[in-house]
Amino acid sequence: MNAVTVLAPGLLTTVQDLGREGYGPVGVSASGAADALALRVGNKLVGNLEGAAGLEMTLLGGTFQFSQDATIAATGADFGATIEERAIRQYAAVSVKAGQTLKFGPTKSGARAYLCVCGGIAVSEFLGSCSTHLLSGLGGFEGRALRKGDVLPIREVTKLLPVQSFSEELRSELAPRKTIRVTRGPQWDSFSKVTQEEFLRQAYVATEEANRMGIRLKGAQFELASSGEMITEGVSLGAIQVTPSGQPIILFVEQQTTGGYPKIANVIAADIPSVGQLRPRDEIRLELVTVEAAHELYREQERLLASWK
């Protein structure tokens, strides 16, 4: 059996694909890669379909050994990946021999790195996806983060031909942003004009209270213009809630599907991968755009990715 063995799991390593859309009404968030762009590019590099399952590592990477020769790609944040202590190039298809050890270290940039293997990680689907949903303990490899000694089967190689490298120009165009673009949220008008202006003017720091459910930001405290209580309603990926503490939280890939806190804004789809690369103490700013502009920015991002052959 072609497989990869976990010699060391790193801080938090899970199996992820592009998530399970459409189950929010029954209380299951999509999950999936925190930086979907990085996973998609990695899969294309090794000849997989874009949505194939790979490994997502957070802040500190793992160490892996392959039972057979394989083609791999390391994308996302730079975790200083090495094969047998020799540095490998990021965003490129790389050959690893049977028995060799692939090691990722601590992050040098960004929060999450991805390991894609030609064929993809072979785990059972849950609700149409291989992604690990840590909160519910479902999907991925036994519904949990990987541990030392886990053996992950690799799927049979597809007939798609791998691309050898990803251009520096495209990497620059698709690189994570520190100015996160947002649209107005459903409760935008529940905040005073002064609060709205301050929300967009100030800088925020990502706190240590961050995971795949959400990223708490630290900035000036906000106050609602209305003191009335909200009825719980559905929330979307990227919604920015303001809790009674007055601090905003960006709801992320494993967010709760309903909430009763006002949502002042929503991160646009094109910038969700940038949120996935935020580390504790990273500083960001927010920029308001229209819904029409958000749609066009997403289309442009998809055009850039499609232009890479």
Image (spheres, rainbow, N blue to C red):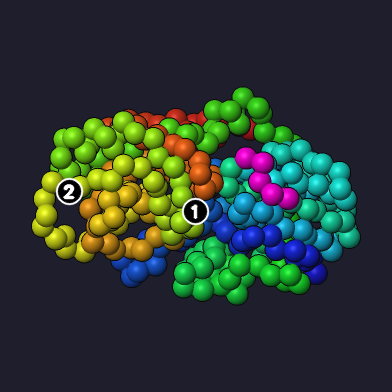
Q: Secondary structure at mark 2?
A: loop
Outermost residue to the top: 169
Where residue 285 sits, quadrant-wise, is top left
Q: Quadrant of the N terminus?
A: bottom right
The residue tagged 2 is: 224
Instruction: Provide residue 17's location: percent of width, then percent of height.
Output: 56, 57
Q: Is residue 188 left or right of residue 80?
A: left
99 relative to 195 in the view: left or right:
right
**Residue type, mark 2 in image:** Leu
Residue 3: assigned label? none
Looking at the rendered structure, the secondary structure element under dot 1 is strand
Say which mark, if any, is on residue 208.
Answer: 1
Q: Quadrant of the C terminus?
A: top right
Give the magenta part as a residue range: 105-109
Q: Is residue 110 magenta?
A: no
Q: Position of residue 29 (x, y in %)?
A: 40, 62
Asked whether the beta carbons under mark 2 and mark 1 sit within 8 Å of each other, the answer is: no
**Residue for point 63% across, 55% down:** 57
Observer-nearest of 86 and 191: 191
126 left or right of 145 in image? left
The question of residue 108 being in magenta is answered with yes
In this view, the residue in front, 220 or 166, is 220
**Residue ID at (58%, 42%):** 110
Counting from the top left corner in percent of width and height, residue 306 is at 54, 34
The residue at the point 47 percent across, 34 percent down is 178
Mark 2 neighbour density, 10 Å: few (under 14) some (14–19) many (20 or more): some
Q: Earlier in the sequence, mark 2 or mark 1?
A: 1
Residue 163 in view in this figure: no
Pick the residue in front: 117 or 247. 247
- Residue beneath the point at 61% across and 24% down: 169
Between the C-alphas of marks 2 and 1, the distance is: 25 Å
